[in-house]
Amino acid sequence: MKKIETAFSHLEYAKWALLPNSPVANPNHSKNLLITQSKPMKIGTFNELVQAVAVISNFNRDYTIFYRGVHFDYQFKNKNSTRSTLLPSIYWKKSIASQKSIGVSLDENFNILSQKTIALLSLIRNGYAGYKTFKNAINFQEILWSILQHYQVCGTPLLDMTHSLHVACSFAYHMNKNNSGIIYLIGMPYIHGPISYYVNEELVNLRLLNICPPIAQRPFIQEGYLAGHFPYNGLLKQKAQAKFDFSSRLIAKFEIPISETFWNQDFKPIPNEMLFPENDEMKELLKSLYKNV
């Protein structure tokens, strides 16, 4: 995927916040490497975060801002530096469902994905009464991948994101035993359909609300999107892994406290039982696919 070379980030916002009323026609922008290597900006409340995101969005008008909430800043370390990394789950070392090893090699991880994709397609054809509302899954493998990813069946080349800051903060907050969580702001091209392909940017972005059948409750509540590198050739090349890392699209990152003081009377964390509803029929349909993951 193509890198966002420079952006008005949390680094610029920290300076802007000191003099918010001063006119800024052409504010400074930070290079991607500096953004990824920097520490997240600490922010105290949800209201303050909303203000920060509003300013950053305004100064990054070429992009739609998506959010990803996690428990800590995932980092890649080498001899020279440490930087944030936002790799899709297939490049992780452990299963997103069980946290157990899912393969000794990238080839094995992709073999698992291939098996689960075929099994899911068979389930949709043979076990789902509303098959016709999900018929596009036959023609677009990324739709099948998005279901496997979003329901944590196995790793895929796609990255979970949301268009809701509230949802992202809830993910960073829930079941977090640390003192803080991380909110990533990811810059994407403007969407133009249920599945948006961007040849020049080498990206694909799927809006789950448009491609999932009505029985799938989780994507609707989470306002879920999944994005990945496009085209898909080269996904198995370990040396090309940096091309698939969404840190290259990172606009800003914030550190929020895991405390009730972060929220206000109007915005509370979305309950876990709403983010992951138990009566989700799609999860029930996928039950057999969770074996041996």
Image (tube, rainbow, N blue to C red):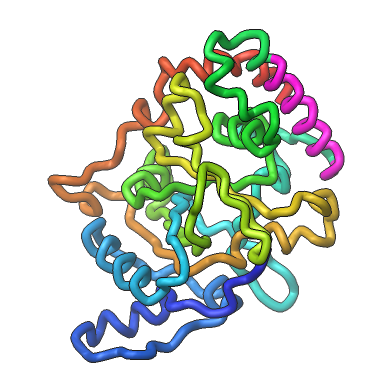
At a point 36% along the width and 48% down the height, the residue shown is: 164
Question: Which one is in front, 183 or 228?
Answer: 228
Q: Main secondary structure of the magenta part?
A: helix
Residue 121 x %, y %: 70, 21
At a point 34% along the width and 28% down the height, the residue shown is: 274
| Rendered image quadrant of residue 90 | top right
Q: Which residues are magenta?
A: 105-122
**Residue 225 against residue 139 in the figure, above or below:** below
| Rendered image quadrant of residue 127 | top right
Residue 117, magenta (yes or no): yes
Residue 15 x %, y %: 33, 84
Left or right for 28, reference 134: left
Quarter of the image with the N terminus in it: bottom right
At a point 84% along the width and 61% down the height, the residue shown is: 239
Question: Which one is in front, 283 or 272?
Answer: 283
Question: Which one is in front, 140 or 185?
Answer: 140
**Residue 146 against residue 14 in the figure, above or below:** above
At a point 42% along the width and 25% down the height, the residue shown is: 217
